[in-house]
Amino acid sequence: MTTGHGGVHAVAAARAHGVSAMFTLSGAHVFPLYDAAVGGSEAVAAEGGPAAVRASNPRLIDVRHEATAAFAAEATGRLTRVPGLAVVTAGPGVTNVVSPITSAKFNGAPLVVIGGRAPDFRAGTGALQELDQPPLLAPVTKYAGTVHDAALIGSSVSEAFARADAAHRGPVFLDIPMDVLYRPIDAATPVAAAREVHLPDPDLVDEVAALLAGASHPVLLLSTDVWADGAEVPARRFAEELGIPVITNGLGRGILPNGHPLLVTRARSTAFREADLVIVAGAPLDFRLGYGVFGAADNPVPVVQLVDSLDQVALHAKAVAVSVVGDLPITFEELIDAWTGLVRRPDLTGWTERLRAIDAAARAEDAVLLRNDSDPIHPARIYGELLPRLTDDAVVIGDGGDFVSFAGRFVEPALPGRWLDPGPYGCLGSGVGYAMAASLAHPSSPVVLLLGDGAAGFSLMDVDSLVRHKMPVVMVMGNNSAWGLEKHPMRLLHGYDVIADLNPAVRYDEVVIALGGGGERVTKPGDIGAAIDRAMASGIPYLLDIATDPEAMYPRTTMGI
Ligand SMILES: Cc1ncc(C[n+]2csc(CCOP(=O)(O)OP(=O)(O)O)c2C)c(N)n1
Ligand SMILES: [Mg+2]
């Protein structure tokens, strides 16, 4: 039994689901949630202040823009595989988190957002910030609703976490009217039920094995949901049993660590063009995967999809031969069994070696770019200096356009769950929130945030939050004084560009210093390495504002349309 106002019941439910942080920005509509997080006024009085009682409760992480709070909660779900929690005040607090909630939807990230709401007893009379919020969030959540009964707060919040964490993972929004949230009540203490198990259809698993038996040029793509579903170990074992070449993307990066003999990410276009079977595990068949068309458009390569839930099956991709729906760890285990049971198992050595050679050649070309000595600095040189300084446990986060696209090409993580990009929704401004989540999830690992100068403008004020919460994020900015990933495409489409230039005189490093962090501006390629060393050794949020060549654009093959 739990006794107290609604905040106590909501926090008890969050705790039952393993939540250890509440990302938020203050608002009176949600004070009871803070009160519960610090243990109530008696505990605060006994402990001599709220800071002292934080340790045994979900830690309150307060920020300067609600978007940062919700991005941090989204990234917590992605990195830790425990749903993240953001709490925002009524009205503008809620409307400020529509973009991060949508990102969570696109990323299959387990996220619960609790919003304040004007009191029910004032409904329709014009109370401050009164807005019917769930209809705004309904299209971008798995569920959006209002809790009108104080007795149901605990069970509703518990249900919200269970829904967010069920396949296919995603965001859930609840708002609680202020009078309901403040009402004291006794209710059963929520318990988190075990996740439901979804077994793949064994006949479909056999069909995949049969397709593999007949394929001489198969390719396996490992993506975000392989990590999200906790399938990284069986997925790697499956790849190694088959000797199948592997490409990774999203949070699937690192499942096969850099240097693994089956990892042929840099031979991706040849692999997809010449494949006779493509197995896509844990990713939608969207623009990043050519909408599921590999090989010749009029005679595409058969595709196998391994997904965690029925709504992930691509209905638009005509080349899909089999879609296996089920928990991905079980699916991979059963595929290993089916494969080892085959009478004839094709030898993939020649095919894998061919792709490895192409991958190695591409990396050798990269090595030249990474040493680029041009002045102004080419963005690739920044990665040339950064890569040897990244430890295996480093978390690398990208927020920007072209500068971050280079990262996608050059940074090959050594461990899974250590790479965060914005995902297919492509929302700039997620970086500082994502970095907060990484600092909490991996407090002893370096957290490196790669920032475009344009992207930085969305959230740089929240470096103040990094400083206050002692999160020593290393920010590496590729500053081309432009919205590069718009400037170059506009030139391509229109022959000129407009409103794509940013002010080259802005000192982003000084902004960070003013907020209590450290920073410096770098203009010479030879100075980058030592500056990264200083940033990593500083122990504080530190921004390297590295002036790069505005003309150095990322060689893009798709604009995502
Ligand atoms: C919220 C949001 N607004 C606008 C865009 C469109 N957009 C995509 S990339 C980009 C340019 C990013 O510039 P910057 O961060 O400086 O990186 P650069 O391409 O210059 O390396 C813009 C404006 C977006 N993706 N998200
Ligand atoms: Mg830029």
Image (cartoon, rainbow, N blue to C red):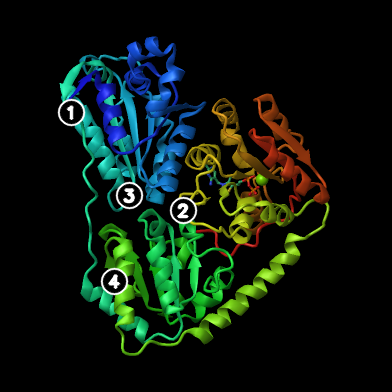
Q: As shown in the figure, which amino acid type bears the numbered disc 1?
A: Leu
Q: As shown in the figure, which amino acid type bears the numbered disc 3?
A: Arg
Q: Secondary structure at mark 1?
A: helix
Give the spatial CA distance, label 3 vs label 1.
Answer: 23 Å
* Contact, mark 4 vs mark 3 (Cβ under 8 Å): no
- The residue where tag 1 is placed is 152
Give the spatial CA distance, label 4 vs label 3.
Answer: 23 Å
Q: Is mark 1 within 8 Å of ligand 1?
A: no
Q: As shown in the figure, which amino acid type bears the numbered disc 2?
A: Pro
- Badge 3 crowding class, 10 Å Cα cut-off, few under 14, some 14 to 19, many 20 or more, is many
- The residue where tag 4 is placed is 334
Q: Quadrant of residue 156?
A: top left
- The residue where tag 2 is placed is 424
- The residue where tag 3 is placed is 169
Chain-order first, disc 2 or disc 4:
4
Q: Nearer the viewer, residue 12 or 278?
A: 12
User: Residue 502: image x %, image y %?
Assistant: 69, 39
- Badge 4 crowding class, 10 Å Cα cut-off, few under 14, some 14 to 19, many 20 or more, is many
Give the spatial CA distance, label 2 vs label 1.
Answer: 35 Å
Q: Secondary structure at mark 2?
A: loop
Tell me if residue 322 comes above or below residue 172 in the rendering.
below
What's the residue at 73%, 44% (across, down)? 533
Give the spatial CA distance, label 2 vs label 3.
Answer: 15 Å
Q: Secondary structure at mark 3?
A: loop
- Badge 2 crowding class, 10 Å Cα cut-off, few under 14, some 14 to 19, many 20 or more, is some
User: Residue 254: image x %, image y %?
Assistant: 51, 60
Chain-order first, disc 3 or disc 1:
1
Between label 2 and label 4, give the one nearer the viewer.
Answer: 4
Chain-order first, disc 4 or disc 1:
1
